[in-house]
Image (tube, grey):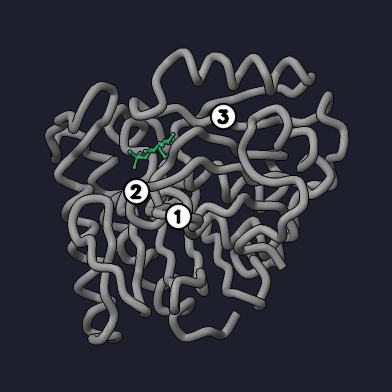
């Protein structure tokens, strides 16, 4: 894991994490607004994104940025940033949130870093270099039995309620347990670390999920082809799971493909 971009992303994520932690611990230091129904925003999101972009720009002046709160400039050398994933949790005093930073070269994910400041947990992957939690290599769980699996099913206001309920019914109908924790990025990191067996969501944005996709792929898991079509610009459905649950979860969710080699997986 000596990719210089991966090392820089980790150092910057840690610095940004300290700022997030301070603001989280003093909730009177920020105000809360909404981008839409159940779509939280705090000024800390923008502040963190500006910090991360300015640090990366100093080191890699030729790179471009796609961020949840700002830049949307794709290129052959682009960083994709979610300053706070799990903003609703952050805003409500729940410590389950993180920063997510991915790097893509010529459309291929090369670096994925997710840092959870309240747990001081650094999840990092580089393409072909494996995935690690705090420097210790990670693997997805060996779960093969859907009846013993725990699946996180993400929800956001873009997906609508009936589609979400139907997805929950189909996944739970196979026997899986289900949670929703409010951070897609951390959900993906937990799949990579073997704490969850799968993550599925009907629509998710690139900044929420790209770092996690590389983490899961490098940790030996299956990930659906998120970057297909206009995934980078407009988002896509996502399924990430242990290889042995792939067939059943592709069938249940209708997301992913039984046969094709997925993007991000080795
Ligand atoms: C959201 C969270 C949520 C997921 C949504 C995302 P945000 O990101 O990751 O868990 O279900 O799709 O939009 O708003 O907290 O950055």
Residue 198: image quadrant is top right
Is label 1 or label 3 in front? 1
* Label 1 crowd (10 A; few <14 / some 14-19 / many >=20): few
Looking at the rendered structure, the secondary structure element under dot 3 is strand
Looking at the rendered structure, the secondary structure element under dot 1 is loop
Determine which residue is flagged by label 3: 153
Work out whether 135 lies above or below 229: below
* Label 2 crowd (10 A; few <14 / some 14-19 / many >=20): few
Q: Where does the image place residue 115, in percent across and percent down from the top left?
A: 45, 57
**Upstream in the sequence, badge 2 or badge 3?**
3
The residue positioned 68% from the left and 66% from the top of the image is: 136
Given residues 148 and 119, the one toward you in this image is 148
Determine which residue is flagged by label 2: 234
Q: Is residue 89 left or right of residue 226?
A: left
Is label 2 or label 3 in front? 2
Q: Where does the image place residue 80, in percent across and percent down from the top left?
A: 35, 63
Residue 167: image quadrant is top right
Looking at the rendered structure, the secondary structure element under dot 2 is helix
Residue 28: image quadrant is top left
Q: Is mark 1 within 8 Å of ligand 1?
A: no
Residue 182: numbered disc? none
The residue positioned 64% from the left and 65% from the top of the image is: 132
Q: Is mark 2 within 8 Å of ligand 1?
A: no
Separation (CA) of disc 2 from disc 3: 20 Å
Q: Are marks 1 and 2 in contact (CB under 8 Å)?
A: yes
Indicate the quadrant containing the N terminus: top left, top right, bottom left or bottom right: bottom right
Given residues 91 and 172, the one toward you in this image is 172
Residue 229: numbered disc? 1
Q: Are marks 1 and 3 in contact (CB under 8 Å)?
A: no
Quarter of the rendered structure image containing ligand 1? top left
**Residue sitting farthest toward the front:** 229
């Amino acid at each position: 894991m000596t990719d210089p971009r991966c090392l820089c992303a980790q150092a910057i994520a840690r610095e940004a994490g300290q700022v997030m932690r301070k603001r989280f611990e003093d909730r009177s230091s920020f105000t809360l607004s909404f981008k839409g129904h159940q779509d939280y925003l705090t000024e800390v999101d923008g502040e963190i994104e500006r910090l991360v972009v300015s640090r990366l720009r100093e080191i890699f002046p030729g790179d471009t940025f796609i961020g949840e709160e700002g830049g949307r400039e794709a290129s052959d050398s682009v960083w994709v940033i979610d300053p706070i994933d799990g903003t609703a949790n952050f805003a409500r005093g729940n410590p389950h949130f993180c920063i997510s930073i991915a790097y893509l070269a010529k459309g291929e994910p090369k670096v994925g870093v997710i840092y959870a400041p309240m747990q001081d947990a650094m999840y990092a992957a580089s393409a072909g270099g494996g995935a690690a939690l705090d420097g210790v290599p990670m693997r997805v769980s060996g779960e093969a039995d859907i009846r013993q699996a725990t699946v996180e099913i993400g929800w956001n206001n873009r997906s609508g309620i009936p589609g979400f309920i139907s997805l929950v019914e189909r996944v739970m109908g196979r026997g899986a347990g289900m949670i929703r924790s409010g951070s897609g990025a951390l959900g993906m990191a937990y799949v990579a670390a073997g704490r969850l067996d799968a993550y599925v969501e009907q629509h998710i944005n690139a900044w929420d999920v790209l770092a996690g996709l590389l983490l899961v792929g490098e940790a030996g898991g299956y990930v659906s082809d998120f970057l297909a079509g206009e995934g980078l610009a407009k988002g896509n459905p996502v399924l990430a799971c242990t290889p042995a649950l792939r067939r059943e979860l592709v069938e249940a969710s209708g997301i992913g493909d039984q046969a094709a080699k997925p993007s991000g997986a080795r």
